[in-house]
Image: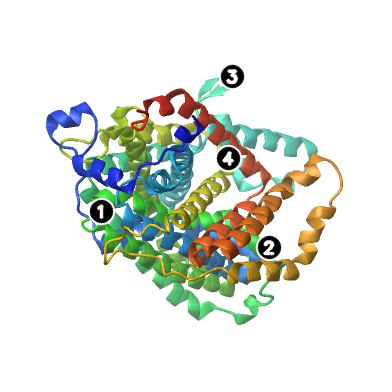
Amino acid sequence: MANNYFRKKTIATILTDIEQGFTDTENAKSGITHLKKVLGVRDLTFMGIAAVIGAGIFSTIGQAAFDGGPGVTLLFILTAITCGFSALCYAEFASRIPVSGSAYTYAYASFGELIAWIIGWDLLMEYAIGNIAVAISWSEYFTNLLEGFNIYMPANLTMDYLSAMRGSEKLAQLTSSGNLEEITDTVKYQALAWNNAPGFGNIKFIADLPALAIVVFITYLVYIGIRETKRATNAMVILKIAVVIGVILIGAHYITPANWSPFLPNEFSGVMKGVSGVFFAYIGFDAISTTAEECKNPQRDLPKGMIYSLIICTVLYILIALVLTGMVNYSELQVADPLAFVFKRVGLDEISYIISVSAVIATASVLLIFQMGQPRIWMSMSRDGLLPMAFSRIHPKYQTPSFSTIVTGFVVAIPALFMNLTEVTDLTSIGTLFAFVLVCGGVLVLEKDKNMQPGRFRIPYINSKYIVPGLLIAGFIVFWGPVSELFQMQGDWHNYKDNLPYFLFIILAVVIAWLSFTKNLSLIPVMGLLSCFYLMTELGYQSWERFLIWLAIGLIIYFTYGYKNSRLNV
């Protein structure tokens, strides 16, 4: 019985299903059972850039620079290397299994159905929560942009219910205690929204309407076709790359090298505080793999698109980080709009305004790519019987996963309208890292497979027999102090829980080092697996706890519906 939970779907079966256009009865009647193939290398590269160059470069980079100082560039390099390992693993899988489904489909072929369900459920969380966060971020940029034109929306229509209520309570508390200097503009605005909102008593009409509007528009764009999505993405990417390059070139003239000293003001631990925000900005290349069935030549173009976009975005992020921390002292960068802020600081208000406009466009492009990726995960899981067949329905005219796209719109729009999601970047990042860990592990499982046609992308084999154990030993020597402190901690559960992920990483690293020595594992996927799992440990116990709760909910659905309805349940 247990073996049935890990039943695998062979690569041959996966490819056959796609060729036959396996879908629901409505598509069988219309004769439209395939997605439209229109994407090339340039389109895939632009989609990767669209998803990566967004809220991260316009907002979260400020907090990361504040925590890590100029040394935040090291975090971008570390994250890029980690994503690079994973991108190579994604690229190999994409060349072997050129279908929509991303890590879900890859796990089905390598680890079996239960793990595939877990990663599919994880991806649904990753995309949904990421989309909600981006929609809320876009709303903030858009509201600020309107104010630049002296257009002011009612405060209660630009934020969520909880933020307004908490802002009102905090204002009342600070006023009564006489701590007036602690009342920020944000708190005043939130209290204004609460006090001026129509309603009855404590039941007030407060909703983020701009967030709702952008989700509806983006969902419509994704619904009507991949060609329209491609054109919109390419236009937005060209514009925002031009703005980012302009920021780098202009900002370089205002750099004061003294601002780069000290390079690591809060040491390496300060740099690592920005992991969730920086990694959240990098997860976009995962979405590229969901478009495999819409690529003209996925086995050739997907690997190139992933790697090209990752390289371009990494270079831009590092240069932006150096410009920001060179123009002003890192201690001033704890702001929501760091790029606009630094140009205001040097008196270039016109540049600041252009950046605000580009931030609106850049954030919309991120939402567009994420909103395109999630329906294709729904569709792939539905094809395998793990979700109702309606999710695999393809629109007869637009040739897009129609029902899944509409469901995705509701799943993102309603929470974005009402919910407060202050910690979504952590939850999205841990979900993405978990997907990367399984993709890297999946390559190790399939690396003995010789059924590779000539010309397909394959990760260069480097024997990890001595390299990984050597790195582990070196790591223990260099970081012996922090490692030994983990085992010397005393106290109750609250003192141990935050360090539990580090214990898990140490155990995993020892096991992988042993397997590398005895099984001659391939180095690149091993390094991808270990580096991604390490970044997961930096996200804290609370993120792990919420992540495991989400997975537990998913397992209930699998055991009550997915297992018995699976196409492999014969």
- Tell me what residue is drawn at x 38 percent, y 45 percent: 105
- Tell me what residue is drawn at x 54 percent, y 63 percent: 527
Task: Return the x and y of residue 545 as percentages of the image width and height.
Answer: 64, 39
Q: Is residue 120 above or below residue 552?
A: below
Q: Secondary structure at mark 4?
A: helix
Dot 2 amino acid type:
Gly
Dot 4 amino acid type:
Phe
Q: Is tag 2's residue or tag 1's residue first in the polypeptide sequence? A: 1
Circles 4 and 1: CB atoms closer than 8 Å: no
**Mark in front: 2 vs 4:** 4
Dot 1 amino acid type:
Lys
Please give the residue where the numbered disc 4 appears in the rendered image: 547
Q: Is residue 475 left or right of residue 34?
A: right
**Mark in front: 4 vs 1:** 4
Between 346 and 378, the one nearer to me in the picture: 378
Please give the residue where the numbered disc 2 appears in the rendered image: 270
Mark 3 crowdedness (10 Å alpha carbons): few <14, some 14-19, many ≥20: few
Circles 4 and 3: CB atoms closer than 8 Å: no
Mark 1 crowdedness (10 Å alpha carbons): few <14, some 14-19, many ≥20: many
Q: Is tag 2's residue or tag 4's residue first in the polypeptide sequence? A: 2
Task: Return the x and y of residue 67 as percentages of the image width and height.
Answer: 66, 61
Please give the residue where the numbered disc 3 appears in the rendered image: 201
